[in-house]
Image (cartoon, helix red, strand yellow):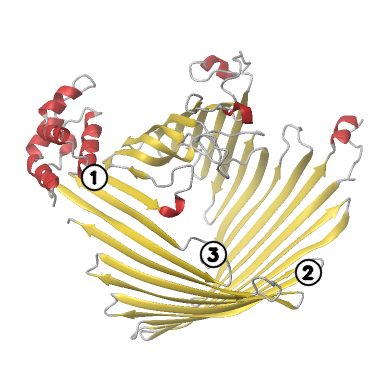
Amino acid sequence: MSRLSIYIVHRLTPESLQGFCQKRVNSDSIRSILKEFKPWRVLYNERLYSAWQIAIVIILLIALSGNLAAQNLESIGKGDAITLSGGINVNQVFYQANGVEDRRDPYNYFLSGNLNLSLYGWSVPVSFSYSNQNASFQQPFNQYGMSPTYKWVTAHLGYRSMTFSKYTLNGHLFLGAGLELTPSEKVKVAVMYGRLQKEVELDTTQVGNLPAYRRMGGGAKVTLGGNSHSVDFSFFKAADDDQSLKTDLGTIEIFPEENFVLGMGLSSTLFKNLSFKGEVAYSAISTNTQSLGVEADHVYNKLSFAFQPRVSSSYYTAMNAALQYQFEKSTFGVAYERVDPGYRTLGAYYFNNDLESIALTHSSQWLNQRLSVSARGGLQRNNLDNQEMNSMNRWSGSLSLNYQVTPKIVTTANYSNFSTVVNFRTPEQQYNQVTPYDNLDTLNYQQISQNASLGVNFMLGQNKERRQNLNMNMAYQQSAEEQGGESKNMGSKYYNLNSSYSMSLQPSSLILSLSGNVNVSEAATNRSLIYGPSLSTRKTLGEKKASVMGSISYNVSETNDKLNSSVLNLRLGGNYALREKHQFNLNITAVNRYTPNNDTQRQFREFVAELGYNFNFSSQ
């Protein structure tokens, strides 16, 4: 144990911590209290910025942010004062190729770890990752963060992600701080603020340079109610800093953006078996914060303190709702969703917009729960504002069955049918047509896709010495197109068949597996076939402290009955556990590929070796 950690355990006694936390503090008294608290003063004066110090300081700052009383520290003096656990993982990857140019770096390393510090009920998890493979990325990959937790308080510090709703803040990574409070089952609060995007300067000498402004954002969500009835309100705001770059990106038509979103969700059990759930969000976004400010005929015009309407501003709405009724053995429901064209927020990476869908759902169980049925069918359309050159209407339906024939035989069957109708309109047709019936069906086409699968699993035998299992799966897919009521092409068909057999010998801790697969794809002029077997084995050694494994597979690819390629893949590996805390593993892969139609790279080999080490520790 380091000198710093020994000092903390010695000076951070239950009496001193409890007496310190009994003080009711505010922002004006923090400075004086920190001076009185001796462990903090020592850490501050010595300037020892170690992982221990950072964790302790963060714990103290969180404690100071509220008015903690003695009843919040009931565990003081009970059990260990400080417990520490975590792990470190190191992986090295070596690569070599013969007969072809290297398709990856010859050497890469990956370092990751986690640390959890617990202090009288406080939990402070810290994680980090680092790799030389991502050194050229413009956005940060090597990230560090922690989420300390104590009872109903959770803080997020460093690189973290949070979610308010599907349409507001949804899993976006940020560098900053967040807080989640659940003082009771009927009250939940979440807040966050941080950097959503790092600034990237324009550099024309770099290939793939994507300049960007620094983007900061923050928001909050409050949920009131329990399982039967609840309502939540949320807001999220993000804006680019137009002063974060030395270069004016307006010359390449990249402008700073601003976004403000309001959201509301509702969940309620209307009757005993009838439930409702829905949410709605309003997003205002300016694609250029340097454009002229205006007065907009919109609710956001009254919220100018949070969002300034501009010439470049747009306003969108997104909503969804679901109604479900539960019978004794079945459930019926209806789901609806509508997202305006162009809807997006700066708190999410991707949105499906310009869509409206409605669907009916059903699930039930029969034959003493041996048969399960799940079905869904509905309609989806786009071009909600009639501004696009084409519109789409898609019917979709799916059916899933799961049937246990006997305790040793289980079958599954799935079917789905998706029908898409696309109506193309050229600009001339859009502006010159006299009636809605002009050019009817001339450029319309329908795309149909059908999917079906069947699976059977057999348990051939199971006893103390031997276990055997046989699994078979079949899949079929077909797609076709129609235009003006006539078939335009034969579409494509896809068949897949795979089967596997496994045997486990309990006394010798040996597992053997044999499998094979066949894939056939048929199009108008081409027919491709891929097939091949594979064999694998795994053996546990030394009272389950070590294991070795190996596998070999061979796959052949043909196009129109002519050999396209053949691939032989060999894998060997092993792992060893030392005193339950140290894990060593080694994996080696060799691939031999033969392509007779490639004159420059007819045959080549690749070799990959991975050496890893994992260390887990705990002070308990």
Q: Quadrant of residue 187?
A: top left
Q: Is residue 196 left or right of residue 337?
A: left
SS label for mark 2: loop
Q: Is residue 297 left or right of residue 303?
A: right
Q: Which mark is residue 102?
A: 3
The amino acid type found where label 1 is placed reads: Ala
Contact between marks 1 and 3 (CB within 8 A): the answer is: no
- Name the residue located 37 percent from the left edge and 62 percent from the top edge: 91
The amino acid type found where label 2 is placed reads: Asn
SS label for mark 1: helix
In this figure, which residue is indicated by the disc labeled 1? 51
In this figure, which residue is indicated by the disc labeled 2? 526
Identity of the residue furthest to the top in this view? 295
Q: Tag 2: Cα neighbours inside 10 Å, few (<14), some, or many (≥20)?
A: few
The Cα atoms of the two marked residues, 3 and 2, are separated by: 31 Å
In this view, 313 is above or below 381: above
Q: Tag 1: Cα neighbours inside 10 Å, few (<14), some, or many (≥20)?
A: few
The amino acid type found where label 3 is placed reads: Asp
